[in-house]
Amino acid sequence: MPDPNDPRVQQMMQQLQQMMAQSLSSGPVNWQLARQLAESELEAENTVGPADQAHVAEAVRLADLWLDSVVNWPSGVTATDAWTRKQWIARTEDSWKQLAEPLAAQMGEAMQTLVPEEMAGMLGPMADLMKGVGSALFGAQMGQALAKLAGEVLSSTEVGLPLGRTGVAALLPGNIAAWAEGLELPVEEVRLFVALREAAAHRLFTHAPWLRSHLLGALEAYAREIRIDEAAIEEAMSEIDPTDPEAAATLDLSEVFKPEDTEQQKAALARLATTLALIAGWINTVVADAVGDRLPTMGRLLESARRRRASGGPVEQTFEALVGLQLDQAKVRAAERLWRSLTEARGVEGREAVWAHPDLMPSAADLERPESFTTVSEALEDLDLSMFDQLAVNDPKDDDEDGPEK
């Protein structure tokens, strides 16, 4: 144990105080560092101009027109936008804060326990030094993750929920063009396919207002159970150069926390995985129905989108980075079968009624036997479900201790 009276220890602590001052004032994640690292790793790209904005607006307009015939809800889009990769990072930051900060805050609290009690006094106002360390580390990790995502993401909703301003359907023309080139398909058709998925996601999240807080609630439930592995973090920190912020990006934070999830964390991850699968399955279903035989390349686009997810697309990268969740694509296919079965049995209105409240949603077990869920839903069809609309609006968040596991 270092001697707190040793001048060398005191000098080291003063240097650490100065180094961490910025991180300590930045909250659980050093977002300035995250932005700097992310933007430094982006490849050069063209700016978006009036032509790009017009193409996006027209694609979303046509997508909404097609969706009107297969979805019971009106459009959730109030504006359109075309983004560069750098703009995607800037304009989605508020949502990333909602997603990442509960986890980072809990990690910071756990890391603070590494400061020996007898040394807390000499730290004075810097007693929460380890929070600053966590802020810098998490900022570096987020910067690296955002840079990778920015190079691949096609729209504002592709990670599983809307990341931009409410009602703004945003596409990334540069990334869409690169994907179209790789598929050897006309960029106009690929852009329309992405616009359909974007517009469908906005309809869903607009008319199921509880859905966003349900996802965030699962992340917060997971965060509450985070525990630190002191030996692992001390070993990892010994290998990091504290004067090199980019070196922190190489640290795998998942290795420094308890490797075994608690039962509460397993339940939160199960609910998160099921909800993400239901969202993706619904979007796939309504987009396929909206297109019909209008788009000859639809089959190739859907298959490419499935392969993209199976190999680690934006939604998979996001939730694996945040909570180590590896999404099972079989769940998405099962969700598609469930929504298809429900549509055939109850029609579009009956299908959308399930989204009125989280308590009406299919569980993980229902994905394994969609016919049974359809039968139960038919039995409930005569109930007045309007009461759930107000319940969903009034729910501040979906707590993991309320209601069944999803």
Image (cartoon, rainbow, N blue to C red):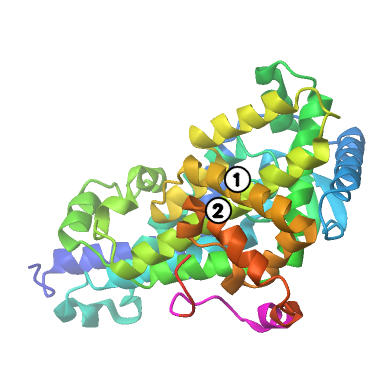
Write down the quadrant of residue 290 in the picture. Answer: top right
Q: Secondary structure at mark 2?
A: helix
Mark 1 Cα within 10 Å, few/some/many (few <14, many 20+)? Answer: many
Q: Amino acid at mark 2?
A: Pro
Q: Amino acid at mark 1?
A: Arg
* Image location of residue 143, percent across then percent down: 50, 47
Q: Nearer the viewer, residue 266 or 152?
A: 266
Task: Report the residue at 47% width, 65% height from top.
Answer: 219
Q: Is residue 336 toward the left or the right of residue 232 in the image?
A: right
> Image quadrant for the N terminus?
bottom left
Q: Which residue is mark 1?
A: 337
Q: Which residue is mark 2?
A: 370
What's the distance in space between the residues labelled 2 and 1, CA to CA? 7 Å
What range of the chain is rendered magenta? 390-401
Write down the quadrant of residue 260 in the picture. Answer: bottom left
Write down the quadrant of residue 207 in the picture. Answer: bottom right
Q: Is residue 210 toward the left or the right of residue 368 in the image?
A: right
Q: Is residue 224 toward the left or the right of residue 35 in the image?
A: left
Task: Report the residue at 22% width, 83% height from top.
Answer: 121
Task: Report the residue at 16% width, 66% height from top.
Answer: 9
Task: Report the residue at 39% width, 45% height from top.
Answer: 249
